Amino acid sequence: MHNMYKGFIFDMDGTMVDNMMVHHRAWQRQLATLGLDLTIDEVKEQIHGINEEILERIFGDRFTPAQRRQIAWEKEAAYREIFLPELRLISGLPAFLEKAKDAGIPMAIGTAAPTENVDFVLENLNLRPYFMGIFDAKSVKKGKPDPEIFEKAAASMGLAAADCLIFEDSVTGAEAAKRAGASAVIVTTTHKREEFAQFNHIVRFIENFEGITVEAGGTFFKVGERYTSR
């Protein structure tokens, strides 16, 4: 894999914000209102995927599609309420975004999160100025692992996905990056390194963004023509 990246694309949940436990807590709270009491470990094990599909899987036809949408909306509102007091970017990411901006590297977001949750993070943390394109669940016809969202994010920067470095935390997201022809960095907030053993396009595993630079000479990312090794 080359290391001349012309743009960066970020997933959001688990990649920019370490929020998966908050989602689990919100699901636990929402399911309890529906008469289903799960431990947090049971939620982590059983509750993943698209909200409405989760509800259909658990409750069968107990709820109409409209009711499922409403319950899903309530769960996401609970997530934002729980998360607000502790909302922050993953350690080191604020400095990393600033370095990339200073180096003139375009950046975009490609996330499966609903628009309301994306707005919640970007607006509360004043992040919009960093990103040329912001794409969420409503932006695409096919979700990850389809590469559509990363292709759109790259196009918003005037780039091909293969010219970008994609930051992800999930196996599904890693698969989407591979299908887009892009290299990936995996943030190990949600999954263990071993779970990505089948991939050959991952250039680095990181716990957070501390100490990662985009400057010249023997550093983590060599970005664009100005950032080749000395």
Image (tube, helix red, strand yellow):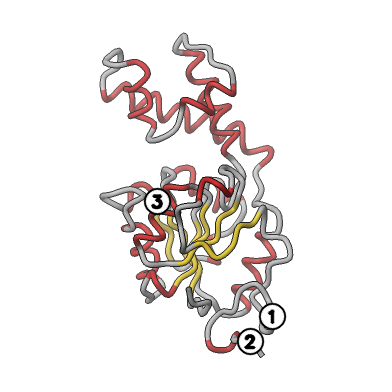
Q: Where is mark 1, residue-wise?
A: 218
Q: Position of residue 201 (x, y in %)?
A: 46, 64
What is the number of the mark on residue 136?
3
| Chain-order first, disc 3 or disc 1 | 3
Q: Nearer the viewer, residue 211 or 192?
A: 192
The quadrant of the rendering that contains the C terminus is bottom right
- CA gap, disc 2 to disc 3? 35 Å
Residue appearing at x 54%, y 33% in the figure = 23
Residue 121 placement, left or right of 68 = right
Residue appearing at x 53%, y 50% in the figure = 169
Badge 2 amino acid = Ser
Q: Residues within 10 Å of mark 2 (few under 14, many from 20)?
A: few
Q: Where is mark 2, residue-wise?
A: 229
Badge 1 amino acid = Gly
- CA gap, disc 2 to disc 1? 6 Å
Badge 3 amino acid = Asp
Task: Provide the secondary structure element on which disc 1 rests.
Answer: loop
